[in-house]
Image (cartoon, grey):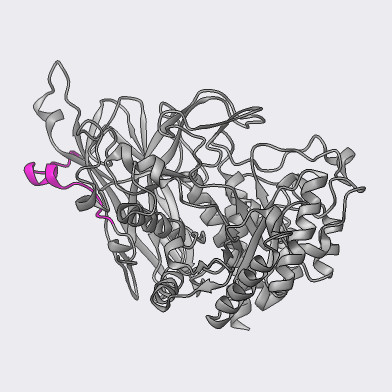
Amino acid sequence: MSLGSLSCNQGDKQDSAANKEVNVEGNNFVRLTSMNSMERIGLDQSPFGTEKVDIKGARNETISFQVAISATHNAALVTQIECTDLQGKSGIISKENIRLYREIYVLVREPSPRAQLPPGLYPDPLVPLANPYKEDSENLTKNNKKIIVGIPFTVWKEQNQPIWVDISIPQSTISDKYSGLLKVTYRSAPSQWGVSKEDASVRSVSIPISLNVWDFSLPDAPVHDNHFGGLENISQYFNVTPNSKEFREIELRYSQLMADNGINPPLPSYFLPEMKENGHLNIVPEKTELLKEFIQKLNISNFPVPMPNIPKEKMITTDRNKAINYFKDYYQYIKTNGWDKSAYLYMYDEPNTKEAYEMVLELGKVVYEGAPFLRRLVVEQTYPQDSSWVDIDPSVDIWCPLFAFIDPKTIDEKLSQGDEVWSYTAISQRTPDYDPNYNQEKDYDPPYWHTDNDLSSYRIPTWINWQYKITGLLYWSTMTDGVNNPWLFPGFIARHGTYNGGGFLIYPGTECGIKGPIASIRLKNIREGLTDYKYFTILESLAGREFVTNLVSKIAPNWWGINYNSQSILSVREEIAQQIMKFKKK
């Protein structure tokens, strides 16, 4: 099993090899426009954006933009898309560092509760132009046919096909301005009436790329803790046996995709120690070495210790000693391997009843008895749901409120006593009636993570977290089993409605004949928010927290006063970058 990075070739050259290219100056019927990563263009929307790509980023950063291919007069069959090397005075950024994806439109039939945008077609899944796992995917087709391909594709008259571009800036890149081209090769799409000789000619159109590389580098691993659920649903979407060799291959590809986008993937269960009958661990050195390799190669910065396979009721009663043995051994295991500062226990999710609060308190005592230094995460806000219930504070080290449940006063109280605070989102919750600030905030909306919300909603939570000294971000799933086929109906159905894209940030590649994951535009914007947080921490080390907070406040002064404008976000990001370089020179 290889832990190497994913890679893909850019485009399908079979058509260009068979046809001599003809550039007809002023006679192109395809227009290219550039958009930033937080913009979306509709299928039949009038083209917008700029006639060139102007992007900026740091070393060791992946920077993204989009290019809309718009057919202005005739339908166009696009046969190849490629980027040149990016040339600078001091060197090049090789085109091998550039990845291209075709954006696929999915249909939002019913609006999500509190949606910002109407039903319709939204570009979301990002299909690579060439299958990165071609040899393994040959038999993974539906009725022996691919339904969706990266390239070639047709852009119909007066319609658009957006292309997503990721440029990974190598750590060794010299600060400079780099220039290149993105080139689209096409010809007139076949017609039942035929096409003229001129229209049948192969044409090409290009858009210039300008990349300014700033003079500082970003760290490899996430600096903002995060947890985005497990990958057990691979077996459902790919029809493979759980924990089989085939399952593990696909799981590793999902893990790589998550890591490439700044998210800590879950640790594979088959690398972990197993619990004996008495609760102690069976530690296999060979598995530990594989786990070390996995953590190092994927730059994992934090991970959850699994709960023991013991019913919670028994953990606090008849199997208490067994559970204590488990936690004691597990903490010793992670400490021996230098992971004790990165690990935490995801102990309880949303204790919303009096009995659940009591369970949290008792479970926390058991964990503490076995491993007093193992952090215990509970998905709960920093104030009690009911003041008459037991106080769970002694059993919680990491609190995790919903975005709309954030309360500055009680967060500061928890932080002052040495606890940590994360945040998370699910469904479309507003402030609950037991929130200390309910009357002032009950009609406000935080960012919601649904397809029919602004893309900046996915980028902005790390800015809010910085504002409140929240250091982690949690999401319940990247591939929930609550969506039957995300390509056809990308909605998670819950009691109060359809939540488009809810719990689903990664698409299965089955519809494309790809034996692995397909990223979404929404996932990419989460990555960019996590990257922004790296900027914050670098500037904090140079100028102090208050200096950074003053800049962050231009976008997110609090969770309800957010500036969602993409140009404003990019402008403040650049301001932060300029300040980093300014302070570095002092």
Q: Main secondary structure of the magenta part?
A: loop
The residue located at (80%, 66%) in the rendering is 415
Q: Which residues are magenta?
A: 8-24
Which of the 4 quarters of the picture holds residue 418?
Answer: bottom right
Q: Position of residue 548 (x, y in %)?
A: 70, 66
Specify the quadrant that holds the N terminus.
bottom left
Q: Is residue 384 left or right of residue 500?
A: right
Q: Is residue 361 magenta?
A: no
Q: Position of residue 35 (x, y in %)?
A: 46, 44
The residue located at (58%, 51%) in the rendering is 459
Residue 361 in the image: above or below residue 75: below
Q: Residue furthest right?
A: 388
Q: Is residue 246 left or right of residue 267?
A: left
Q: Answer yes or no: is residue 141 visible.
A: yes
Q: Is residue 17 magenta?
A: yes
Which of the 4 quarters of the picture holds residue 493?
Answer: top right
Residue 269 in the image: above or below residue 520: below
Q: Position of residue 89 (x, y in %)?
A: 34, 73
Q: Is residue 30 left or right of residue 196?
A: right
